[in-house]
Amino acid sequence: MRITPFAIWIIFASAVLQAAEPPAAKPDETKAPGHSLHGEAFNEGPRQAAVLMPGTGDVRFPVTTKNELAQIFFTQGVGQLHGFWYFEAERSFRQVAALDAECAMAYWGMAMANVNNQKRAANFMKVAVTKKGAASRREQVWIDAWAAYFSESKKEQGERRSALVKAMEEVIYEFPEDLEAKAFLVYQLWDNSQHGSPLPSRLAVDALAQQVLAAHPAHPIHHYLIHLWNVGESDKRAVAAAARCGPAAPAIAHMWHMPGHTYSKLRRYADAAWQQEAAARVDHTYMAAARIMPEQIHNYAHNNEWLVKTLAHVGRAEDAVELAKNMIELPRLDAGRSQAHNLGRERLVETLVRFEKWDTLSALEGSIYLAPDAKPELEAKRLAALGVAWFSLGKTDEGARLLQALETHRTKVRADRVAAADAAEAKAKTDKKSADEIAKAMADALKGFEYAVSTTEAALAEVKIYQALADTRLDAVKPLLAAARDIPAERRARLHFAIGEKDEAVKQAQQASDADPAQVQPLANLAGILWRAEKKDEARAAFEKLRKLSAHLDIALPAFAQLAPLAEDLKLPKDWRLPATTAADVGTRPDLAALGPFRWRPSTAPSWSLPDGAGKTHALSDYKDQPVLVVFYLGSGCVHCIEQLNIFAPLTKEYADAGIRIIAVSTDSAASLHQTVEQAKDKAGFPFPIVADPSFEAFKAYRAFDDFERIPLHGAFLIDGTGAVRWQNIGHQPFRDGAWLLTESKRLLSIPREDKTGTAAK
């Protein structure tokens, strides 16, 4: 039976396919609450049960186990490895171990799911080695090959990688029918080439992959072929793999994303956007079913920021802006990890300025979408974008305000630069460094500021250009253009045209379009400038090229609306776009809507009703229309939990002032809750209610529970007034940065959430 992508997560959420629960682990008094009984390596990673997930790849990898379900989960994990879905691969392999603790290859799989974490991988491999005696000869060879790679960390990496390739070749020599050995060798040869080892023949590696595909045409090795040929001008050789990659493992978002690499390099941006959008939609469906935060997903931020850029390339500016805003809206995991947020900010400003969406840009000033940036160079660009927007709208007073803000920013950046150099000099002198060493220390300290200073200077020049245009001081524009280095060529062309330099405008516009003739906005810009420069025939020719790429562009945007006179001259309808066509070489594509939603939305919090120490019942429904922070802690005997509660206690009023209430859920019985209260630093106890969940039902419902070891985990959940989980943290350690979380909670709660009827809700 063919599993269609839209059905995958219905299966994911189905309790029918849940693996049998292992017996509860015996308490170990030497382990801190929430920590794995199996060692440090098991503290991190997924600790909730895996589920059978059709659509992870056509792979065959038999291992030694008498448990049929364990074999199925193992095969699933291998498919997830091929899709670089390491988080879920580790979950599948943990399920194998839960079903058959003596399956040595389960621990090999956990190690492989941590190829980017040497320490964890080595610890998992140690377990695999201790259990390999009961495994087959073939499995032992696999384990030995990777055990040497992960454990011999003192050896030079290139040497270890070469030894691994030779070891995998030995597996194939001894077991020539082992297609997975060939698949992993293809991966390893490519991966080695990314770390300094030469790859003498891509054709030879491709030929090895074709042996796998000859037996299993839908094998996820298509993923590796895309990587293999994603170099130089070779991407055309991966077109067939690009067509088959997503359908080979439709449950894995990265498998939909990877063809975007091929199509982007070939400048087939509509196809690239389709693939990246498919990846985003599959990710969004998965996150809703698994109830995890977006930035827990490998490659999620990378895929979406690339999608924003690709949407802009094809002229889907409105969608690009909405997706960039959605990236900014995503919950940040903690104070140090916010890749999606930062990339979303950059792409949002870039897109708004590129498509001259001045009304939208100015309206976002003061919102979370354009809040001040900690990086001085990005703050300069933010201020410049707002200044340009206000002057372009004719609001010169507002523009002058932003110009003054940029002047102030420049003064600060310069002062910070001097202070950094002085601090470096003082430290070097204190350390009794030589004159040369002191000079080097000062130079090194200045490096981080050079770009910030130069970017700020360029930003000032850019805003002054638009101020001069608003004041009709055209003679002041040209000298500023040289200093405004960050203005792209197509916009620079329009500025030259505005001051009467038509030939230079045409030259700049032509250069911008020639740099990438498949992008619609530079091409539209060229056609418009040629038309206004009275180069009618050239304008018509450029317009006809644009029409061939016009299927997806937002025709109402200024970049395209300006071409109305040209379309009228050619006797075309007002909507002059040509209908979209699908290339014959992209394979069969599912309906995008069936893969999942375009935007990420928070999941709904499970309901609960629990007693406090006085016998009063508290429920999530008590917090309807009001946000609440629910803290799951592991009882009065957990030292770190008590520390956590005592961190949040003095912040309770600040949370309340922000409209957020706090409640703690304990693993203790209601009769034992007094033991927690007695450990409060305040003699009056904790200023928030504490309720009991000794059966762990609420812990399980919120997935703050290790399904493999049957032990509760620490958890914290910000739930808004509509019952949506806006932020969460689950792990072996309690979340203790209460001050940062308060700031993040305010930010998240300022974002309206669309309810099922499409109306905004908070």
Image (cartoon, rainbow, N blue to C red):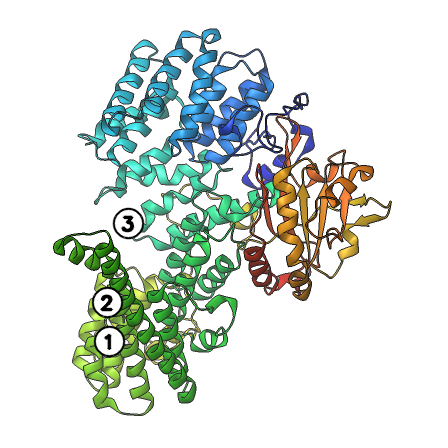
Q: Earlier in the sequence, mark 3 or mark 1?
A: 3
**Which residue does the image show at 29% across and 88% down from the upper left?**
468
Q: Which mark is residue 266?
A: 3
Distance Cα–Cα, label 2 vs label 3: 18 Å
- Residue type, mark 1 in image: Ala
| Cα–Cα span, label 3 and label 1 | 26 Å
- Side of 596 where 455 appears, left or right: left
- Above or below, comparing residue 11 to residue 349 in the picture: above
Q: Nearer the viewer, mark 3 or mark 1?
A: 1
Element at label 3? loop
Label 1 – label 2 distance at C-alpha: 9 Å
Whether residue 719 appears in this view of the structure is no
User: Along the horizontal axis of the image, is 545 left or right of 4?
Assistant: left
Q: In this view, which residue lies farthest toward the bottom?
A: 472
Give the number of callouts. 3
Residue corresponding to mark 2? 512
Q: Which residue is mark 1?
A: 493
Vertical arrangement, residue 552 with respect to residue 669, above or below: below
Pointer 3 local density, CA inside 10 Å: few below 14, some 14–19, many at least 20: some
Secondary element type, mark 1 = helix
